[in-house]
């Protein structure tokens, strides 16, 4: 997310998603919405599903960047062979919301340097709770880290161009 939205925006979005899919009434509301409207399916992109649920920053540049990031997740791998990151998230949410016993869900992040794939696990992410969740983890890097990586690539390319001109 760091290359697309501010770190503070990413944190705000995580809070929104985790509140919307949380334990109790929130997940039951999402189950009812899914049953009636099929918000999460192969007919809708992750971007359009989140837009419909108003899981986004306020209108402006950060909102545009957030939606661009959701589109970019289509280029990320996932822990399921042949399924990109965005589709893996949509399939996971759909499967969970349509299950006979849906679990609350959490979105978290992990360092992209360690694993570039979107991953899904069933675990207890809240240390003091025995409640199991479907945990979606998205690879990310901080904004500064992304900018430094881009700068390294630019410098390396300039060196190559200089040496090619000689």
Image (cartoon, rainbow, N blue to C red):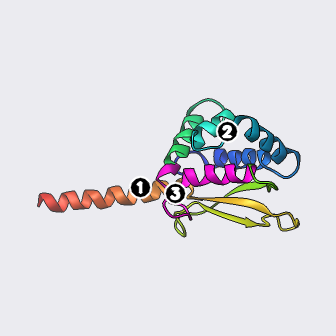
Q: CA distance from mark 1 to mark 2?
A: 36 Å
Return the residue at label 1.
Answer: 150
Pinpoint residue 134: horizontal percent, then vertical percent: 73, 59
> The residue tagged with tag 2: helix, strand or loop?
loop
Q: CA distance from mark 1 to mark 3?
A: 27 Å
Q: Is 148 placed above or below 51 here?
A: below
Secondary structure of the magenta portion, mostly? helix
Q: Quadrant of the rendered structure where residue 42 is? A: top right
Q: Is residue 105 left or right of residue 149?
A: right
What number is the disc on residue 124? none
Q: CA distance from mark 2 to mark 3?
A: 19 Å
User: Residue at 36% across / 59% down in the picture?
Assistant: 153
User: Residue at 71% across / 60% down in the picture?
Assistant: 135
Q: Is residue 116 left or right of residue 40?
A: left
> The residue tagged with tag 3: helix, strand or loop?
loop
N-term mark: 1 or 3? 3
Q: Residue furthest top?
A: 59
The residue mark sitting in front, 1 or 2, is 2
Pinpoint residue 39: horizontal percent, then vertical percent: 67, 38
User: Residue at 56% across / 51% down in the picture?
Assistant: 87
N-term mark: 2 or 3? 2
Residue 81 in the magenta stretch? The answer is yes
Return the residue at label 3.
Answer: 83
Q: Residues in magenta? A: 73-97
Pinpoint residue 81: horizontal percent, then vertical percent: 51, 64
Return the residue at label 2.
Answer: 39
């Amino acid at each position: 997310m760091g290359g697309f939205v501010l770190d503070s925006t990413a944190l705000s979005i995580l809070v929104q998603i985790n509140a919307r899919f949380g334990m109790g009434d929130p997940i039951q509301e999402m189950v009812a919405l899914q049953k009636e409207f099929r918000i999460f399916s192969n007919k809708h992109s992750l971007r359009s599903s989140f837009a419909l649920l108003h899981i986004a920053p306020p209108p402006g540049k950060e909102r545009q960047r957030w939606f661009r990031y959701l589109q970019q997740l289509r280029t990320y791998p996932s822990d399921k062979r042949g399924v990109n990151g965005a589709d893996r998230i949509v399939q996971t949410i759909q499967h969970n919301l349509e299950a006979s016993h849906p679990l609350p869900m959490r979105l978290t992040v992990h360092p992209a340097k360690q694993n570039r794939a979107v991953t899904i696990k069933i675990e207890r992410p809240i240390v003091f709770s025995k409640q199991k969740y479907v945990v979606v983890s998205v690879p990310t890097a901080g904004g500064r880290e992304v900018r430094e990586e881009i700068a390294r690539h630019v410098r390396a390319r300039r060196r190559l161009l200089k040496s090619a001109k000689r």
